[in-house]
Image: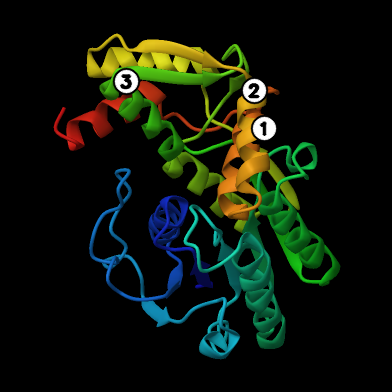
């Protein structure tokens, strides 16, 4: 039985990866900063991991002294560890690059056979964003390490789509540009299957999206239908996001990254090879039920 370390195990994707690994019979060690969240389901319908994990390792990957033994005795490291929102304490490079680099170095020292990492689809088109730079700098380290590896490049998560429900409920749906760019986001459970397939497979790079493709406007319409409201649709020029990014760059680079990313995805299609079976409508309906609407 292979032993797997999962870093980012309490995040949206990490929880589903833990579930999929357990379903396939793997022994799982989960790296967590604390155990407060392990018994609770995630905010976007993902499972609680306490019943699924064989061993919890409490440590902080940004502080290498706390994770020196985390890779000992495991065959594979899977990491979806990354900055998901500004915490005003760590930078994108602290987490997406340095924390993962700490894991990689300990993995190599422990003789881990493979390292699987989750980055971003079409990252090469967004290299002006510090978060993307951090992801890709780590990918470069991983390629150069000599360890067997796989890099997963998803288009986007269903969890990101929940913001459309909030805007629809509030009565105003904002978009950048014409809202005509296409994307195929993927459910965490479907992406987890792709990730575990990559653990078991030989591909070094896996680009992945969900089974359905939408424009921004189509997602907005779907969210409005689910909540039973017709919000006011407002289109903002893309230069607004660029202007916000320029201003916030003097205050906080993580907030600047959010504005730059919003601008970038509003300028290009983001459609990867389709995988999975979960539909966005079903996800939004379940989220709306969970939130009591």
User: Looking at the picture, does residue 260 appear above or below residue 60?
Assistant: above
- Rendered location of residue 153, percent (x, y): 66, 44
Q: Callout 1 environment at 10 Å: few (<14), some (14 to 19), or many (20+)?
A: some
Q: CA distance from mark 3 to mark 1?
A: 24 Å
Disc 1 + disc 2, Cβ < 8 Å: yes
The residue wearing badge 3 is: 168
The quadrant of the picture occupied by the C terminus is: top left
- Rendered location of residue 91, percent (x, y): 60, 63
- Rendered location of residue 239, percent (x, y): 67, 24
Q: CA distance from mark 2 to mark 3?
A: 21 Å
Quarter of the view holding residue 160: top left
Judged left or right of residue 138, residue 257 is: left
Residues 182 and 88: in front is 88
The residue wearing badge 1 is: 242
The residue lying at 23 percent from left, 65 percent from top is 39
The residue lying at 50 percent from left, 73 percent from top is 1
Q: Callout 3 environment at 10 Å: few (<14), some (14 to 19), or many (20+)?
A: many
- State which tag comes first along the sequence, 3 or 1: 3
């Amino acid at each position: 039985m292979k032993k797997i370390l999962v870093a980012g195990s309490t995040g949206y994707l990490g929880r589903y990866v833990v579930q999929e690994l357990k379903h396939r019979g793997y022994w799982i060690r989960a790296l967590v900063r604390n155990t407060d969240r392990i018994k609770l389901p995630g905010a976007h319908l993902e499972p609680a991991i306490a019943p699924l994990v064989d061993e919890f390792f409490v440590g902080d990957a940004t502080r290498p002294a706390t994770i020196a033994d985390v890779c000992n005795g495991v065959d594979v490291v899977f990491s979806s560890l990354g900055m998901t929102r500004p915490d005003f304490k760590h930078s994108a490079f602290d987490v997406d690059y340095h924390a993962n680099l700490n894991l990689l170095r300990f993995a190599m020292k422990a003789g881990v056979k493979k390292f699987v990492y989750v980055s971003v689809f079409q990252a090469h088109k967004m290299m002006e964003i510090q978060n993307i730079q951090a992801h890709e700098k780590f990918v470069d380290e991983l390629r150069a390490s000599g360890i067997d590896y796989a890099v997963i490049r998803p288009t986007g998560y269903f969890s990101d789509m929940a913001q459309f429900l909030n805007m629809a409920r509030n009565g105003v749906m904002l978009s950048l540009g014409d809202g005509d760019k296409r994307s195929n986001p993927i459910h965490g459970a479907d992406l987890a299957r792709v990730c575990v397939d990559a653990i078991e497979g030989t591909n070094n790079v896996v680009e992945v999206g969900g089974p359905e493709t939408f424009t921004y406007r189509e997602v907005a319409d779907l969210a409005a239908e689910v909540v039973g409201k017709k919000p006011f649709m407002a289109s903002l020029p893309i230069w607004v996001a660029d202007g916000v990014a320029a201003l916030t760059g003097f205050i906080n680079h993580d907030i600047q990254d959010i504005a730059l990313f919003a601008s970038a995805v509003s300028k290009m299609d983001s459609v990867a090879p389709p995988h999975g079976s979960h539909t966005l409508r079903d996800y939004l309906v379940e989220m709306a039920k969970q939130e009591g609407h």
